[in-house]
Image (cartoon, coloured by chain):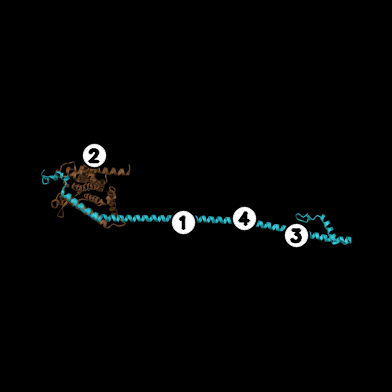
């Protein structure tokens, strides 16, 4: 084939494809070494540093956020406890007030009852005393009148002692129980 | 029929129709082209002769990748902010991937700190080499076009990692690194012994030792070939699909037919393979280095 004659034999056959080229290998090694040196020395540390810094910042902000959340939780818990406490306190106050009101009422009722009974007793005693006094008065009056009447009838004056004895005798049989409100038949 | 199904079917119908139309326009006339050899797209022509250090296309790509790797990373590293913008976020994601997944995921933290610059650079260097391989650059010095009187090399897709020398030397560095780590951690004899699983003695140990020795050597080859073959084959397929096949077979209609597939493969290579292969290379390096330090 005359057209391909100007080409080197290796080039047209294709075996150059798998024949290592020493010059190219050295170039590769050299350029790779340069790349590694520059990247390893000036590039990777900078990127790594920036990434680490960001990592730190993120960690810090997460920590901070967590701390804040903890604080907030604690605060809420505290408020809740305080609320519970005040509710309990309020309940207690109401309870105490109710109890005290009850006690007060009961006391007042008892006191009133007592007072009423006292007054009744007093009244009864007053009435009794008054009755007794009135009976005594009537008795004396009757005795005096009797003495007077007897004197007038008999024209005779009995001495004072005889007379009283007579009247007492007479009056003993008389019943004054109707005048006494309660146990009057003793007199 | 769902809406998605309708759209997919519509696209296929359109595709078939266009293909039939193209056959009608161009006809099925075939004239084989023996002059165009697709592998020559990967041929290295010395542009600047410096003996062993001659600068060719792959070297230019490597230099470009190096400049981009160092330049972008350096630029980003000087503008690291507490509140990152999108570019910084992307770089941080990549950095975390290199530091946490590639390095720390495969070796103890103390070792990861020491080896991270190596592994990180490995990933970035390969990644950039792969990525710029999908930029059409005027680097095909065999085909030239003329623009305002200047002869400019044709735009082409090429990748330094599609040349076997580049993955090979990187794999060699990894190979030396993990063997060195193994010898340092367990002593030369201890490291050799660690190749044989514990509890095996006698002839079995000998056989297994040889097998493990070979498999250790194979790591060098598998690292090299995995990266090289993936990138190379990706480029070859894109080349075929986006015109190479049509040129070789002299079938114009086929060229149009294959173009959508070529675009899809291009996107697949750019979006997945370029990154994935860099990641796999660096991760395997980390696994080998981490594994050599610990007895296994």
Q: Are marks 3 and 1 on the same chain?
A: yes
Q: Which chain is brown?
A: B
**Looking at the picture, how far across and down is residue B68, in whole percent?**
22, 54
The residues bearing labels 3 and 4 have C-alpha atoms spaced at a distance of 35 Å
The residues bearing labels 1 and 2 have C-alpha atoms spaced at a distance of 75 Å
Contact? badges 1 and 2 (CB < 8 Å): no
Label 1 element class: helix
Image mark 1: chain: A
Report the quarter where the N terminus of chain B lies: top left
Pair 1/2: label in front: 2
Q: Which residue is mark 3?
A: A130
Q: Colour of chain A?
A: cyan
For residue B296, which quarter of the picture?
top left
Image mark 4: chain: A
Q: Are marks 3 and 4 on the same chain?
A: yes
Pair 3/1: label in front: 3
**Looking at the picture, how far across and down is residue A96, in whole percent?**
56, 56
């Amino acid at each position: 084939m005359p057209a391909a004659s100007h080409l080197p034999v290796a080039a047209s056959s294709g075996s150059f494809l798998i024949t290592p080229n020493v010059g190219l290998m050295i170039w590769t090694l050299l350029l790779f070494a340069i790349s590694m040196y520059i990247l390893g020395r000036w590039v990777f540390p900078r990127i790594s540093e920036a990434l680490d810094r960001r990592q730190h910042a993120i960690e810090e902000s997460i920590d901070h956020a967590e701390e804040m959340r903890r604080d907030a939780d604690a605060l809420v818990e505290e408020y809740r406890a305080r609320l519970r406490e005040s509710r309990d306190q309020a309940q207690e106050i109401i309870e105490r007030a109710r109890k005290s009101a009850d006690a007060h009422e009961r006391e007042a009722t008892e006191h009133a009852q007592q007072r009423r009974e006292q007054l009744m007793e007093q009244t009864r005693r007053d009435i009794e005393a008054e009755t007794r006094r009135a009976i005594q008065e009537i008795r004396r009056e009757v005795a005096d009148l009797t003495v007077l009447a007897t004197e007038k009838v008999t024209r005779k004056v009995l001495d004072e002692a005889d007379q009283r004895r007579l009247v007492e005798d007479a009056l003993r049989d008389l019943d004054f129980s109707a005048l006494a409100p309660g146990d009057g038949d003793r007199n | 029929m769902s809406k998605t199904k309708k759209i997919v079917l519509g696209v296929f119908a359109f595709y078939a129709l266009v293909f039939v139309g193209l056959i009608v326009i161009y006809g099925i006339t075939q004239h084989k082209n023996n002059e165009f050899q697709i592998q020559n797209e990967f041929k290295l022509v010395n542009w600047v002769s410096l003996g062993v250090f001659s600068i060719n296309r792959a070297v230019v790509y490597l230099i470009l990748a190096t400049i981009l790797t160092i330049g972008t990373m350096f630029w980003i590293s000087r503008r690291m902010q507490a509140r990152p913008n999108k570019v910084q976020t992307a770089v941080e994601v990549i950095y975390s991937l290199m530091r946490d997944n590639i390095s720390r995921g495969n070796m103890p933290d103390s070792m990861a700190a020491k080896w991270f610059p190596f592994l990180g650079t490995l990933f970035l260097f390969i990644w950039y080499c792969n990525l710029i391989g999908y930029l059409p650059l005027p680097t095909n010095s065999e085909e030239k076009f003329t623009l305002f009187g200047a002869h400019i090399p044709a735009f082409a897709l090429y990748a330094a990692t599609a040349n076997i020398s580049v993955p090979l030397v990187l794999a060699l560095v990894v190979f030396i690194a993990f063997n060195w780590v193994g010898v340092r951690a367990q002593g030369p004899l201890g490291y050799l012994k660690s190749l044989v699983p514990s509890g095996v003695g006698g002839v079995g140990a000998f056989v297994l030792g040889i097998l493990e020795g070979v498999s250790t050597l194979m790591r060098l080859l598998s690292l090299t070939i995995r990266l090289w073959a993936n990138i190379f084959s990706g480029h070859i397929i894109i080349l075929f699909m986006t015109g190479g096949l049509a040129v070789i077979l002299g079938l114009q209609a086929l060229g149009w037919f294959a173009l959508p597939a070529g675009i899809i493969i291009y996107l697949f290579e750019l979006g997945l393979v370029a990154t994935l292969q860099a990641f796999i290379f660096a991760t395997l390096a980390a696994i080998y280095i981490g594994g050599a330090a610990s007895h296994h």
